[in-house]
Amino acid sequence: MLEAAEKTFQSGEKIAASFRRVLVIVAPPGSVSECFLPAVEREFPWIFIEQVDTVEAACSKFAYPVSLILVDSAFLDTLNAFCDVMNDWHPNAIIAVMYDDCPDHADTVDEILASKAVRSVLPMNLRLDIWLSVIRLMLRGGEYFPSSFFRKRRLVDIQPVNETSTPRAAKETRSVEGDIRMLNYLTEREIQVLEMVSHGCQNKLIAAKFNLSEHTIKVHLHNIIKKLGTRNRTAAAAMFLERDRSDGGQQSRAVLTLSGK
């Protein structure tokens, strides 16, 4: 089908219209790099890109048949809930999760592997030419999971348990320590935003504090949640407070200094 679309597009747009296909991107506004979309349009001129910011919005009719649906990993729970509806609307589409390949995201790996909706994973930190090759594979109906994805899973499976504690307690201890370490992957600004969230500040107040737009704050929060592998801002803030307690408040004092309080 892909090769036929390429040849048909070369012979004329009228005939080519019958080969048009849709790629749906389900992600918060501004979370997908702007360089990706033009690259897809140049590489696959018969592909029409539709961007929506909820899984529900993807469950609808588009101008052409849908071949590929790329879903932000933050929407995994909603995607699982709408799996059957999505398949009814787009029975021939591959559903892939856009995934930032950060260390220690074992919980997200588990969620993706357990999902009955997800058929592929699209790492968002690949070199552009390799990233487009993965897109091409998915458009042809192929499935893709990066090898690092399974290495993370194996590392979690074989991690030894402390003999002095119960398996469940040891697992929870490792989980908390691993989660807190993920804060090291946040940028200085993301730490500042997260610290204000941990004090109950709303987006409007945070935006005013740093002289940013509310949309920018939402993008920062989206990136924070993805990097930490949490379900929402409340869980991310709890992680920050946990580390703050463990280091005697040094984290908050450092952030307060950086933010000019």
Image (cartoon, helix red, strand yellow):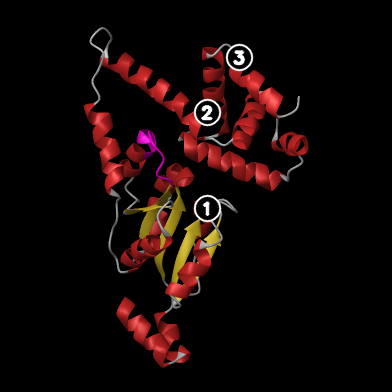
Which residue was labeled with disc 3?
249
Mark with earlier residue (2, 3): 2
**Three-letter amino acid code at disc 1?**
Ala
Indicate yes or no whether the magenta region holds residue 105: yes
Is residue 33 left or right of 189 when viewed as pictured? Answer: left
Local secondary structure at mark 1 = loop
Rendered position, 3 above or below 137: below
Residue where numbered disc 1 is placed: 27
Q: Is residue 130 left or right of residue 164?
A: right
Q: Categorize mark 3 by other alpha carbons within 10 Å: few (<14), some (14-19), many (20+).
A: few
Regarding mark 2 in the picture, which secondary structure is present there?
helix
**Is 42 inside the magenta-drawn segment?**
no
CA gap, disc 1 and disc 2: 20 Å
The x and y percentages for residue 188 are 61, 34
Which mark is in front, 3 or 1? 3
Which residue shows up at 47% across the image and 63% down it?
A: 24
